[in-house]
Image (cartoon, rainbow, N blue to C red):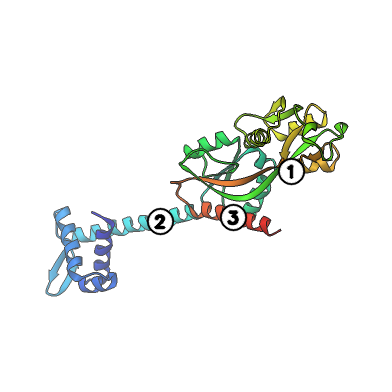
Amino acid sequence: MTLRHFRIFQTVCRLSSMTAAANELHISQPSVSQAVRELEEHYGTALFDRIGRQLHLTSAGKALYGYATHILSLEHQAGEAMRGFAERGPLAVGATLSIGESVFVPMLAEFRAVHPEVPIFSRIANTHDLEQRLLADDLDVALIEGDVHSEQLTAKPFLVDELVLLASPSRHLTGTVSREAIAGVPFLLREEGSGTRALFEAVMQAGELPYETAGVYNNSASILQAVAADLGLAALSERIAAPAIAAGDVTTFTVPGVRFQRTFRVVCHQNKYLTPTLRAFLAFCEGIGREKAAR
């Protein structure tokens, strides 16, 4: 038996007429008769007494009417609950460390201000870890810099970011310096799997600029402290380094022909069901990209 059978049966009971039920449900009268007949055959008992042209519920029919009403009410409640869950469903969102240290928290705060009813779980990790969690459905969406590697993930750009070269003020590296000035000097790098490190290594290799590794850190705050202490140079997001630059803790400089530009991407599994909550977050990210591009 299906909900369709119960819905037809309930309508016939309420209207005491198969013809009237067919008109209300916008189906044919034979379809209504067949549904009632299938119910009677399934339960092995008559549900209506047919006296002349009038339908009268039997004792079994009255009992089934109560059950059918309860079943259809539960189905309606389930639908309402699931629609409410979808509209106010939780959001599990991740971000790489570079995004997490710059735009992630302000983004989540702004999204929550518009959608205060949405529970948000957030995670900050490196690009490799986030990709694995998206593939395992541990995250709904992730904000990642650079490229993704799995063909099962779809990525859409939403924000352009740029790394800047940083040094301790004691090195007197400001403005534009020659390539020779940084060739072979020690750099402080992010950990393996970091999008920031991947970009740095790719640009330095493409520019044929050799360097030494002075240290490996899993967060930008520690790198900024190490640069300020003159333990090495670094390339970090301008958004992250801005407070330290403004405070005079580090200086920034450029090298002709060397530019570290990357794109922040919103990444989902290609088969991920887009709930209203997830759709709203994706649209929110797209809006941020348009806003930044217009400035």
* For discs 3 and 1, the disc positioned in front in the rendered view: 1
Circle 2: residue type? Gly
* Residue at the limit of the structure toward the left, as seen here: 52
- Left or right: residue 245 versus residue 50 is right
Tell me if residue 274 can be seen. Answer: yes
Q: Which residue is mark 2?
A: 79
Query: What residue is shown with label 1?
Result: 238
Q: Residue at (51%, 50%) from the top-left corner?
A: 89
Side of 196 relative to 15 (left or right): right
| Crowding near the residue tagged with mark 2, few <14, some 14–19, many ≥20 C-alpha atoms within 10 Å | few
Badge 3 marks a residue whose secondary structure is: helix
Q: How many marks?
A: 3
CA–CA distance between discs 3 and 1? 21 Å
Height in image: 167 above or below 280? above
Q: Nearer the viewer, mark 3 or mark 2?
A: 3
State which tag comes first along the sequence, 2 or 1. 2
- Residue 122 screen position, x and y as percent: 59, 42
Q: Which mark is residue 286?
A: 3
Local SS, label 2: helix
Q: Quadrant of the N terminus?
A: bottom left
Q: Amino acid at mark 1?
A: Glu
Image position, residue 182 (x, y; %) = 77, 31
Is 49 in front, or is 220? 220
Q: Is residue 80 above or below residue 257?
A: below
Q: Secondary structure at mark 1?
A: helix
Percent of width and height locating residue 278: 52, 51
Q: Is residue 62 above or below residue 136?
A: below
**Residue at image coords 86%, 39%:** 248
Please report whichever mark, 3 or 2, sits nearer to the chain's N-terminal start: 2
